[in-house]
Image (cartoon, rainbow, N blue to C red):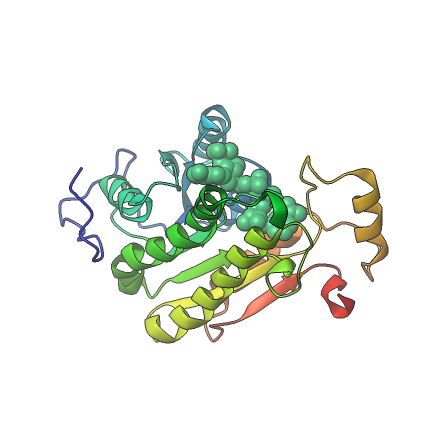
């Protein structure tokens, strides 16, 4: 592995896929082994995309998903392991992607950590870990993927959170990281235009985290005009819209049952 250069990854003309080359568009989805990422992967695959399934610890789930997609369409999915907390994770992931694929049409920054970080228990290590995974690496993934995406007039979709713009007590580091991701989305929409569109999706309550107790879940639903949790397919629907929305860039769609209306 070459030392990080700070510039975008240069893709070799000899780059080849271990899976058979096709002319299908390809989406790279981080944190795609399970939950929202996996549902989004299935949706885009159903729409004709080949899928690069990034994972970190969920190797079994990632391989099972790739096998499922490849059974449906041979050679249409492969897995990539990368710890996104690593300083050079963005460059490494794109470099490893480019060993297996010759084109990239969509980058979805979906992976994230969601830890409570009350102010009185905060420490710099927790800050750096959260910002690295939720903000720094998505930013550098955009940088390193840009040359490939530019060739396809592709798209980047950053998965944020309604709490990026409306605070959640006890989660200031997470909210900060997602607010930064929205700033990245809007800034890079300007910088990467006109070849690459950059948009965001801010989910509300879709799949609960283990840390979210019954009282919190009840309160969240009470504050949601549509009165229920969203489905992972609601996020996949928004992703599918944004990959096709050729005249939309720099926008963030709240998929939250209306909850952000009175937060
Ligand atoms: N679930 C919701 O209701 C909800 C609400 C608001 C916003 N969101 C946002 O929507 C996105 C998906 O939500 P989710 O609940 O499906 O996410 P999640 O399960 O919390 O996390 C998705 C994936 O992130 C990966 N990840 C975590 N740390 C990593 C690291 N150090 N290196 C590489 N990958 C790492 C994990 O991959 P491995 O399992 O392979 O380790 C994990 O499966 C996230 O960006 C989240 O913030 C979700």
Nearer to the camera, 154 or 120: 120
Q: Is residue 211 in view?
A: yes
Image region (quadrant) for ligand 1: top right
In the rendered image, residue 100, in percent from the top left (x then y), is placed at 26, 39
Q: Which of 119/43 is in front?
A: 119
Farthest residue, direction top:
60
Q: Is residue 153 left or right of residue 40?
A: left
- Judge left or right: residue 24 versus residue 48: left
Residue shown at 84% from the left, 43% from the top = 215
Quadrant containing the N terminus is top left
Q: Residue at (15%, 41%) from the top-left corner? A: 2
Residue farthest to the front, as pictured: 120
**Residue 242: % across, % down:** 52, 63
Q: Position of residue 94 (x, y in %)?
A: 29, 47
* 65 over 161 or under it: above or below: above
- Quarter placement of the C terminus: bottom right
Along the line of sight, the residue nearer the viewer: 32 or 140: 140
Q: Is residue 99 left or right of residue 126?
A: left
For residue 117, what is the image quadrant? top right
* x and y percentages locating residue 224 in the rendered image: 80, 58
Residue at image location 63% in from the left, 44% down from the top: 116
Residue 38 in view (yes/no): no
């Amino acid at each position: 592995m070459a030392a990080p250069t700070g510039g975008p990854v240069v893709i070799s003309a000899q780059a080849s896929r271990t899976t058979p080359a096709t002319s299908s568009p390809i989406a790279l989805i981080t944190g795609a082994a399970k939950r929202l990422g996996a549902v989004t992967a299935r949706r885009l695959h159903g729409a004709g995309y080949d899928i690069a399934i990034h994972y970190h610890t969920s190797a079994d789930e990632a391989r099972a998903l790739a096998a499922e997609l490849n059974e449906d369409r041979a050679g249409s999915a492969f897995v990539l392991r990368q710890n996104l907390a690593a300083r050079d994770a963005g460059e490494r992931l794109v470099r490893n992607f480019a060993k297996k694929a010759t084109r990239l049409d969509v980058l979805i920054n979906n992976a994230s950590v969601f830890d409570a970080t009350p102010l009185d228990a905060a420490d710099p290590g927790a800050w750096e870990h959260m910002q690295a995974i939720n903000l720094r690496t998505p930013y550098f993934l955009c940088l390193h993927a840009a040359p490939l995406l530019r060739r396809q007039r592709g798209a980047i979709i950053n998965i944020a959170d309604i709490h990026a713009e409306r605070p959640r007590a006890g989660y200031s580091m997470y909210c900060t990281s997602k607010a930064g991701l929205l700033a990245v989305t809007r800034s890079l929409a300007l910088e990467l235009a006109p070849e690459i569109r950059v948009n965001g999706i801010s989910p509300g309550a879709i799949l609960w985290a283990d840390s979210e107790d019954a009282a919190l879940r009840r309160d969240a639903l009470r504050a949601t005009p549509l009165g229920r949790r969203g489905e992972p397919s609601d996020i996949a629907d928004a992703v599918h819209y944004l990959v096709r929305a050729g005249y939309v860039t720099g926008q963030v769609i709240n998929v939250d049952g209306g909850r952000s209306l009175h937060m």
